[in-house]
C-alpha cells in the first residue's frame, strides 16, 4: 500500500486533535469538581505570584446531553466554561446565545443558579485532544474577561483571589440539574428558556422593569400551556359545537385575564395563584401603558406567579427552582443603610490613597472613637 502524503497526515491529526467550539461561562464564578479529579486548591502565595494551576482551569471534566444531534454534547471545564460544537444550526450569534441560555435556564430550573449571557459573553475556541478547551477570541463581557485572565495567568492578585476559596459545584450535581431542567422545559414546549433566564437574571440584578417584562412573557407562555391542556384539548375531544376550538384559541376573546379567571373556575390554578398573577398583571399593565417602573414588591409578585404556574403546569413537586433562594444572589439595595458589622478580613492589601484621603480617614476614625465614649 502507498503511504499517505505527509500533508494529508498532518491535516488528519489536526482535524482529530483540535476541534472548533463555541464557549460560554457560568456566572457567578464556580469551580466544577469531579470525583475522578484532584480537588481544586490555590494558595495565597500562588495568587500573589500568578502560579496557580492554569492547566486545570482549561481541563474538560465531563460532557452533558443538552439535546444536540448525536454524537454532539456539551463539554464542561473545571472553571465553569462550557463548550458546544459550531454545528450549522448554531452558527448565528443569536442562535448560539439562545442555545447557551436555554442550557443555563435548565440549570436554574434544576436548582443551580446562573445568569444569562449576551452576545458579548460568547467566545470561540477549540477542544485539544478532548482534554482541554482553549479560548481563542476575546469577548468583552466582564465574566469572559475574568476567565481569560485567570486562564492566561494574567489576572491581578485583586482578581485572582477568587481562586483561593471559590464556590464549588460538583459535575454530578450540574449534570443532574441540567437534565432535570431540560425535562421541565420539554414538558412545557411553550416556555422559552432564554426569556425565562433573562427574567431571573434581571431580578437578581434588581432591574425590576426587565424582570417584570421578561417574566410576564413566561407567565403568558406557561398559561398558554395550561390553557391548551385543560381547555383546548377537552374541547377538541368533545365536538358538540362546530368552531368551538377555534373560538377558545382566540386571544382577542380569551385575554390573559379571562384565561386566568376560567382556569381558576375549573380548578387548574388555585386562588393564591390567581391573586398573585393578578398583582403581577396590574404591575405589567402599568409598566406597558404608563411607563412607570415597578417596585420590588411587583417583581416579587411576578416571580411568585412564575413559580406557582410552573407547579400547576407540571404537577411536579421536584422542581428545585421552586425552593431556590434568589436573595442569595440578589444585589443589595445601594440606598438601604447597611448594618455596621465588624470586618474580619482573611487577607488584606494596601489601597493607593488619593490626595487628602488619609486625612479624611483619620477624621472619620476620631469621630467614631468620640461617639463610642
Image (tube, rainbow, N blue to C red):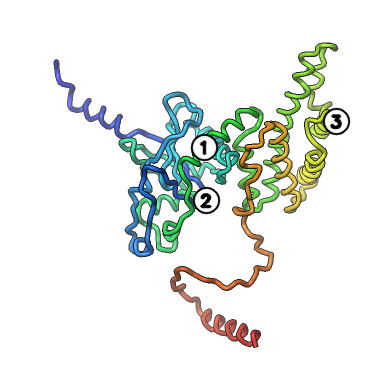
- Marks 2 and 3, Cα distance to the nearest angstrom? 42 Å
Q: Is residue 136 visible?
A: no
Of badges 1 and 3, nearer the viewer stands 1
Left or right: where 341 falls relative to 61: right
Identify residue for label 1: 176
Disc ID at residue 167: none
Quarter of the figure with the C terminus? bottom right
Structural distance between the alpha carbons of marks 2 and 1: 19 Å
Q: Residue at x 80, y 13 (%)?
A: 238
- Name which residue lies at 33% across and 48% down: 55
Q: Where 13 sits versus 215, above or below? A: above
Q: Nearer the viewer, mark 2 or mark 1?
A: 1
Relative to 347, residue 94 above or below: above
Label 3 Cα crowd, 10 Å radius (few <14 / some 14-19 / many 20+): few
Instruction: Indicate the position of residue 71 as horizontal and vertical percent values.
Output: 42, 25
Considering the numbered disc 3 on the image, is that residue within a helix, a strand or a loop? helix
Q: Residues within 10 Å of mark 2 (few under 14, many from 20)?
A: few
Ranked by sequence position, the earlier of labels 2 and 1 is 2
In the displayed structure, 145 sits above or below 240; it is: below
Local packing at callout 1 (Cα closer than 10 Å; few below 14, some 14-19, many 20+) is some
Amino acid at each position: 500500500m502507498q503511504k499517505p502524503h505527509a500533508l494529508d497526515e498532518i491535516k488528519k491529526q489536526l482535524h482529530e486533535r483540535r476541534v472548533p467550539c463555541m464557549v460560554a461561562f457560568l456566572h457567578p464564578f464556580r469551580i466544577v469538581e469531579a470525583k475522578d479529579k484532584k480537588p481544586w486548591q490555590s494558595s495565597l502565595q500562588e495568587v500573589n505570584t500568578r502560579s496557580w494551576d492554569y492547566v486545570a482551569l482549561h481541563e474538560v471534566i465531563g460532557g452533558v446531553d443538552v439535546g444536540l444531534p448525536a454524537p454532539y454534547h456539551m463539554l464542561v471545564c473545571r472553571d465553569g466554561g462550557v463548550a458546544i460544537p459550531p454545528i450549522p444550526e448554531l452558527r448565528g450569534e443569536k442562535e448560539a446565545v439562545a442555545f447557551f441560555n436555554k442550557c443555563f435556564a435548565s440549570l436554574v430550573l434544576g436548582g443551580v443558579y446562573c445568569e444569562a449571557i449576551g452576545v458579548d459573553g460568547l467566545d470561540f475556541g477549540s477542544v485539544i485532544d478532548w482534554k482541554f478547551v482553549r479560548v481563542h477570541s476575546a469577548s468583552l463581557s466582564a465574566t469572559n474577561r475574568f476567565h481569560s485572565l485567570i486562564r492566561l495567568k494574567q489576572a491581578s492578585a485583586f482578581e485572582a483571589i477568587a481562586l483561593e476559596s471559590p464556590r464549588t459545584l460538583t459535575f454530578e450535581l450540574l449534570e443532574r440539574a441540567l437534565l432535570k431542567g431540560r425535562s421541565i422545559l420539554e414538558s412545557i414546549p411553550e416556555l422559552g428558556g432564554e426569556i425565562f433566564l433573562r427574567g431571573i437574571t434581571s431580578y437578581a440584578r434588581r432591574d425590576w422593569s426587565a424582570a417584570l417584562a421578561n417574566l410576564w412573557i413566561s407567565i403568558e407562555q406557561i398559561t398558554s400551556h395550561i390553557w391548551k391542556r385543560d381547555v383546548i384539548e377537552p374541547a377538541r375531544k368533545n365536538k358538540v359545537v362546530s368552531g368551538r376550538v377555534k373560538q377558545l384559541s382566540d386571544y382577542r376573546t380569551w385575554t390573559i385575564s379571562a384565561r386566568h379567571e376560567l382556569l381558576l373556575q375549573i380548578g387548574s390554578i388555585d386562588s393564591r395563584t390567581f391573586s398573585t398573577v393578578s398583582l403581577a398583571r396590574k404591575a405589567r399593565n402599568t409598566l406597558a401603558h404608563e411607563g412607570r417602573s415597578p417596585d420590588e414588591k411587583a417583581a416579587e409578585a411576578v416571580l411568585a406567579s412564575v413559580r406557582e404556574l410552573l407547579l400547576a403546569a407540571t404537577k411536579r413537586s421536584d422542581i428545585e427552582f421552586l425552593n431556590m433562594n434568589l436573595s442569595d444572589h440578589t444585589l443589595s439595595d445601594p440606598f438601604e443603610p447597611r448594618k455596621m458589622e465588624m470586618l474580619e478580613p482573611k487577607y488584606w492589601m494596601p489601597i493607593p490613597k488619593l490626595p487628602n484621603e488619609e486625612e479624611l480617614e483619620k477624621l472619620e476614625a476620631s469621630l467614631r472613637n468620640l461617639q463610642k465614649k
